[in-house]
Structures are given as C-alpha cells and as structure tokens.
C-alpha cells in the first residue's frame, strides 16, 4: 500500500518559499547586522577584536598624554607604520598558506643595502637601483620555493637560514663604511619624508575610494540577485558607503590640519587594496586560501599547489624588499641596523595581531594595516610617556599572545559550530 503525499494547503509556503523568505529577511541593514552576529557566533571574528584594541590603546594613551591624538603625532604614526607594514603585508601571504618566513627583516635590510650601494656608490639611476633591489626579493622567493617544493625543507628552517645568510650579505655589501647615506634631495628620500598630498587631492581621493566601494558592492549585489541569491539592499549599501565617507573624510581633514596625508602612506594603502582584490576577487587568491585551509584537498581539486606556494614565497620576499627600500628612504640611509632588531618580529606580529591565522587559510590584506597601527601606536604612546623600549616589548608581546589566543578560541568555535 502506498501512502499518498500530504496535501499542501493552497497558499501555504513550500520549502523553497520559506528559504526565499529567510534570504530576503537577511537583506538590508538589519539583515547585515544579523549576518554579522551569526558569523561572530560561528567564530568569524574578523577585524572586530583588533579595532576594539585600537580604540582602547588610543583612549588610554590620550588620557595619559593629550599629545597622542594630535594631528602632528598621527601624521608621524602613519609614516612610521609604512615600511614595516609593507613587510607585514608580505607575511600575510605566507601565513595564509600555513607557512612562515622568519627572514623578512634580513631581506629588507639586504634590499636597502642593495639600493644604497647601486644608487650612491655605483652611481646607477634610482629606478634601476630600486628595480635591482626588488629583483633581490624575487631571487630570494625563488630560492625558498626550490628548497620547499623540490627538497621538502620546512619554511621555518629555510627562512631561519635565510635570516642569517642575508644579514651576512647585507654587512658585506655595506663594507667598511658601515652605512651609506642617501642624498636628501633625491626623489626616493623626498617621497618617504616630505611628500604629502595637497588637501584638495586628498578629499578627491576619498570620494573616489567611497564611490569605488559603492560601485563594487552594487555590482556584486546585482550579480547575486541575478543568480537568485540573497544580497544587501541598496539602502544598506548607501548607509555603509555614507559611514565610510564620513569616517575617511574626518580622518583626512584631521591629518590635513598638520602636514596631511603622506604619499608613502597612500602607496601602502594602494598595495593593500590591490592585495585585497587579488585575494578576494581572483582565482589566484582563492587558491591561496584553499591551499592554506587544506593543501591535500586543494591538490585533489586540481590546484597546482607547488605553484601557489611559489607565489606566496615570492610575493612575501618582494614586499620585504619594498619595505626595506622604504625604510632606507625614511631614515635617509642604509645601515647594518636596517631590517634588524625588532623589524622581523614586528612584521610577523602585525600580521597576526591584525587577524591573520597562524594555522593558515584565514586572514585579510587589511590585517597588515590594522596590525601595524596597533604596534606603531604602542611604540608612539610609550615614547611620549618617556618609557623605555622594554615596556614596548612587554606590551606588544601581551597583545600578540592575546591575538593568538583569540584565533585559537575562534578556531574551536568554528569547529564546534560546524559539527553542530
């Protein structure tokens, strides 16, 4: 005997109708908030912890010293964050793959010595010296790729050896003079020290950035609706873009009260935007996340895993070279100390504090920006309080430990949420 299927009352919603209703309920500003809450409960913390951390750090230092949030100090903070921030951006790529590069400081120092030697000592034009210095990063990345893919040497060991070896090459290049001063009137030094955007240009750039964000969101929402998927409403997108416009506009106005927005900081932001686009909107970027999440599954799905690792190491080393060039330009010289000290650890810490997981597969290019802002803020605040560097190391270490702990808790939360 067969049982007839239950009759559905006329007008009653079927499963697909209920699904559409749930999807539509997620549209708009309230839907965006609810989706964000769901992600938070599922362990996807995003940039929220580090943004809260920045607010706490800035509030604390402002109370202790009213100069901290002055326009002059914030302009200095943006400029001081760039060199190490660019290096941290490279670290994001290798961390997304679940690997590590301990030699980025030495590579940056070697690149700084290379550009100074070719430009000042050998007399090559600045563009040629910069290109050769970036070429150093490409070679280093290819060497790491060969050792990792062909011989299976762990990235920790490869980069630890590179840390020592490239520091030796840096000292050899600088020779007996120990340091090489870059001409103050050169374009490279002026770019890093005294080049700022005109006020009008900075406001136009803000408008262009907000318009681009709105256009991108509108296009993506339309594409999702065409495929029958849920998408943010236009009103919600307008509110989000309006808030971004106000935030960027106020920040730009406040910096313009002093010297303004430095071109070097704009360059850093452009690198982040390009990296974010490549990671989130291209097949290449999705491959990096896939390999970092599960290399074997990525291989079985047809991804050339070795090639993805190669790109990760090369991009990391190239950005380390760029960071070294900017550091030399900012200081006006290349010295044996360039890239040494806490540069290496600060770059790694910035990427992790910004939310990039040490376990691979999770992170964002924006992690480099917010992470280095945290570290630079701590350094600036303690300097204004006339406290020794020992306090800076202790505070930075505590923040780093907290970031890793949050990442571990989030991983367990995602795992339990997925099982549930």
Image (spheres, helix red, strand yellow):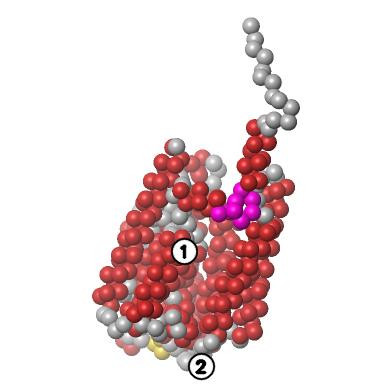
> Who's the residue at 59% across and 53% down the image?
30
Residue 278: give x, y in percent of width and height.
58, 60
Magenta-colored span: 26-33
> Who's the residue at 36% across and 69% down the image?
346
Q: Quadrant of residue 91?
A: bottom left
> Compared to 412, does 73 lie above or below?
below
- 84 and 373: which is toward the camera: 373
> Who's the residue at 69% across and 58% down the image?
234
> Compared to 262, does 364 lie above or below?
above
Residue 309: give x, y in percent of width and height.
47, 54
Residue 238: give x, y in percent of width and height.
66, 63
Q: Quadrant of the N terminus?
A: top right
> Compared to 281, does 125 lie above or below?
below
Note whether residue 257 is visible. yes
In the rendered structure, find residue 152 and report the number of the disc placed on it.
none
Q: Answer left or right for 17 relative to 354.
A: right
In the rendered structure, find residue 367 and report the number of the disc placed on it.
1
């Amino acid at each position: 005997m067969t049982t007839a299927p239950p009759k559905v009352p006329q007008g009653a919603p079927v499963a697909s109708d209920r699904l559409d209703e749930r999807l539509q309920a997620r549209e708009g500003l309230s839907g965006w908030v609810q989706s964000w809450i769901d992600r938070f409960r599922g362990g996807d913390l995003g940039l929220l912890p580090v943004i809260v951390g920045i607010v706490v750090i800035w509030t604390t230092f402002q109370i202790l010293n009213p100069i901290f949030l002055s326009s002059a100090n914030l302009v200095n903070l943006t400029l001081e964050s760039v060199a190490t921030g660019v290096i941290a951006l490279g670290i994001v790529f290798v961390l997304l793959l679940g690997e590590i590069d301990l030699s980025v400081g030495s590579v940056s120092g070697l690149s700084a010595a290379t550009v100074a030697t070719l430009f000042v000592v050998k007399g090559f034009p600045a563009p040629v010296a910069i290109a050769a210095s970036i070429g150093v990063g490409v070679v280093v990345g290819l060497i790491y790729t060969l050792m990792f893919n062909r011989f299976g040497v762990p990235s920790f060991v490869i980069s630890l050896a590179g840390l020592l070896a490239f520091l030796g090459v840096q000292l050899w290049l600088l020779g007996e003079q120990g340091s090489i001063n870059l001409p103050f009137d050169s374009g490279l030094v002026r770019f890093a020290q005294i080049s700022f955007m005109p006020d009008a240009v900075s406001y136009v750039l803000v408008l262009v950035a907000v318009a681009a964000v709105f256009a991108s969101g509108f296009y993506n929402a339309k594409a999702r609706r065409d495929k029958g998927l849920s998408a943010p409403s236009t009103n919600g997108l307008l509110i989000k873009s309006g808030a971004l416009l106000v935030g960027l506009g106020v920040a730009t106005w406040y910096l313009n009260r002093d010297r303004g927005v430095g071109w070097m900081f704009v360059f850093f932001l452009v690198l982040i935007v390009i990296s974010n686009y490549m990671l989130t909107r291209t097949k290449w970027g999705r491959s990096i996340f896939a390999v970092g999440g599960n290399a074997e599954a990525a291989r079985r799905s047809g991804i050339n895993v070795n090639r993805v690792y190669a790109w990760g190491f090369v991009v990391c080393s190239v950005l380390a070279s760029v960071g070294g060039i900017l550091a030399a330009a900012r200081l006006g010289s290349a010295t044996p100390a360039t890239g040494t000290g806490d540069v290496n650890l600060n770059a790694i810490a910035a990427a992790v504090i910004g939310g990039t997981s040490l376990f691979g597969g999770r992170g964002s290019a924006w992690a480099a920006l917010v992470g280095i802002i945290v570290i630079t803020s701590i350094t600036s605040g303690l300097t204004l309080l006339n406290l020794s560097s020992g306090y800076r190391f202790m505070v930075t270490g505590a923040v780093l430990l907290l970031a890793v702990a949050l990442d571990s808790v989030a991983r367990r939360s995602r795992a339990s949420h997925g099982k549930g």
